């Protein structure tokens, strides 16, 4: 067997290093999307910078997906809508910035198609969800984030964003656990050591928040630590992560994200979580619906304050949603083709607000379909439905026809996307960059489970 010449050998080693770097950055992106939009943007930017030379070296291929069509159409229509906006400059700035996030779909597809790397990316996301959930719980019980107008935000900017991510993580982790065939292994010593270090770091972070000392610096260190941990899970070739790492993280994440979701007091996320978990139960074994029903009944019997005070539809925020949706319908009638323009809903609301509405200003219409139709026109809303329908159909097919070992991923993606749509009936969750990162990852997962659909693009 011949030995490669020095130059090709060096090229191969560089290529392998770039391969591992991209996979590590995608895992860090999944983890940090739970905690910091800035950190996730940095990870995405670095991943793209690694992906481009891999394309040039032919170590990566730009694979075709049926998802390419609606993504391209959504981008084009958004740019057209911005062109017809009353303030094109602001619309291009607002709408165009979010379009850059679609790079996630193409970079992640290349990493998620390999089982080991796909599991590590999901482990990174689970790790980020644990930290997010602990942050919400500690804020609620120790830092005074316990009223409706001052709910836990954890490491993020708004409780709605935190709720959406906790909802999605809970569904994904439940799918990973329920579709596991082998008995759960005991946590390894390395896992316990790292869990202890994480607990100590979070305890120190909470203490600094209570003392109001170096809280921002501590938060940045936590986020950076999570990113490094996610990357190390991909890059490590040692004894950690081991066979028990994924199950240990998943078992930790489920109760933490579930209780954090309760104290977030976000009803749309509760509804989305129930529907997503019910779908996972039906996909695994319909009798598990009784378990879910029992857990809900137990929660109602316990009557926790965060739940009981939110079981109403006559509060001011619920009533106000009705009137803002009416204003959204009026906006669509006013400009049905290209809409009011990306980023223009707050300005347009001054003209279309109904007198009965209590909020005189808003940032969005608290409904995905209505927001896209009012902001970018009815054609864009149809394109958005096309975009989300394709991964839903593909995830369903992978669940029914795919290999058993991949069903936890396909069912998790299916449950997550359905939950996002259900919660999105009352919230514009596609407008949160952190949530959109995870949505795009979950949209790509079903396409990464099988060989590419067509030849390589050039």
Image: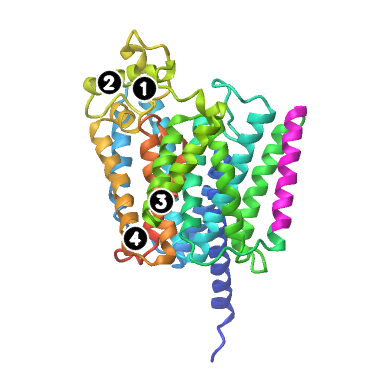
Q: CA distance from mark 2 to mark 4?
A: 39 Å
Is residue 196 in the magenta section? Answer: yes
**Residue 319's quadrant in the figure?**
top left
Q: Are marks 2 and 1 in contact (CB under 8 Å)?
A: yes
Residue 233 visible in the displayed image: yes
Q: Of callouts 1 and 4, which one flags the residue occurring earlier in the amino acid sequence?
A: 1
The image shows residue 406, relative to residue 158, as above or below, that is: below
Q: Of callouts 2 and 4, which one flags the residue occurring earlier in the amino acid sequence?
A: 2
Image location of residue 271, percent across then percent down:
41, 35
Q: CA distance from mark 1 to mark 4?
A: 38 Å
Q: Of callouts 4 and 3, which one flags the residue occurring earlier in the amino acid sequence?
A: 3
Graded by Cα atoms within 10 Å as few (under 14), some (14 to 19) or many (20 or more), the crowding at tag 3 reads many
Q: Secondary structure at mark 2?
A: helix
Q: CA distance from mark 4 to mark 3?
A: 14 Å
Q: Secondary structure at mark 4?
A: helix
Q: Are marks 1 and 4 in contact (CB under 8 Å)?
A: no
Relative depth, front residue between 187 and 214: 187
Residue that badge 1 annotates: 345
User: In this rendering, which labeled residue sits more in front, label 4 or label 3?
Assistant: 3
User: In this rendering, which labeled residue sits more in front, label 1 or label 3?
Assistant: 3
Mark number displayed over residue 331: 2
Q: Of callouts 2 and 1, which one flags the residue occurring earlier in the amino acid sequence?
A: 2
Please provide the residue range marked out in magenta.
192-212
Q: Of callouts 1 and 3, which one flags the residue occurring earlier in the amino acid sequence?
A: 3
């Amino acid at each position: 067997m011949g030995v490669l010449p020095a130059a090709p050998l060096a090229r191969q080693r560089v290529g392998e290093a770039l391969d591992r770097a991209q996979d590590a950055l995608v895992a860090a992106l999944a983890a940090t999307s739970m905690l910091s939009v800035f950190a996730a943007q940095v990870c995405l930017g670095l991943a793209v910078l690694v992906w481009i030379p891999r394309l040039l070296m032919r170590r990566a291929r730009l694979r075709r997906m049926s998802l390419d069509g609606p993504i391209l159409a959504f981008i084009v229509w958004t740019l057209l809508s911005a062109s017809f906006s009353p303030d094109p400059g602001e619309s291009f700035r607002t709408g165009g910035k979010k379009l850059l996030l679609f790079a996630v779909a193409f970079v992640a597809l290349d990493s998620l198609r390999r089982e080991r790397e796909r599991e590590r990316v999901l482990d990174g996301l689970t790790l980020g969800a644990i930290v997010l959930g602990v942050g919400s719980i500690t804020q609620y019980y120790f830092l005074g984030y316990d009223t409706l107008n001052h709910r836990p935000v954890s490491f993020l900017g708004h409780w709605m964003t935190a709720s959406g991510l906790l909802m999605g993580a809970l569904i994904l982790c439940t799918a990973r656990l329920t579709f596991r065939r082998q008995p759960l292994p005991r946590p390894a010593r390395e896992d316990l050591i790292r869990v202890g270090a994480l607990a100590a770091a979070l305890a120190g972070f909470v203490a600094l928040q209570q003392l109001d000392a170096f809280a921002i610096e501590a938060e940045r260190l936590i986020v950076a630590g999570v990113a490094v941990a996610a990357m190390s899970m991909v890059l490590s070739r040692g004894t950690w992560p081991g066979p028990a790492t994924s199950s240990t993280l998943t078992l930790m994440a489920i109760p933490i994200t579930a209780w954090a979701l309760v104290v977030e007091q976000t009803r749309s996320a509760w509804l989305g979580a129930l529907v997503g978990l019910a779908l996972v139960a039906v996909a695994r074994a319909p009798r598990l619906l009784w378990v879910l029903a029992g857990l809900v009944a137990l929660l109602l019997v316990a009557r926790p304050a965060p739940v009981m005070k939110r079981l109403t539809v006559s509060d001011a925020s619920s009533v106000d949603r009705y009137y803002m949706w009416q204003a959204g319908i009026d906006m669509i009638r006013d400009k049905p083709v290209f809409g009011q323009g990306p980023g223009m809903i707050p300005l347009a609301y001054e003209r279309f607000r109904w007198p009965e509405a209590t909020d005189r200003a808003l940032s969005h219409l608290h409904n995905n379909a209505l927001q896209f139709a009012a902001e970018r026109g009815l054609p864009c809303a149809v394109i958005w439905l096309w975009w989300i329908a394709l991964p839903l159909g593909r995830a369903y097919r992978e669940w029914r026809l795919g290999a058993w070992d991949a069903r936890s991923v396909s069912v998790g993606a299916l449950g997550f996307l359905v939950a996002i749509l259900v919660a999105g009936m009352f919230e514009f969750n596609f407008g949160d960059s952190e949530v959109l990162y995870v949505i795009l990852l979950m949209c790509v997962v079903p396409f990464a489970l099988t060989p590419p659909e067509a030849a390589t693009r050039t």
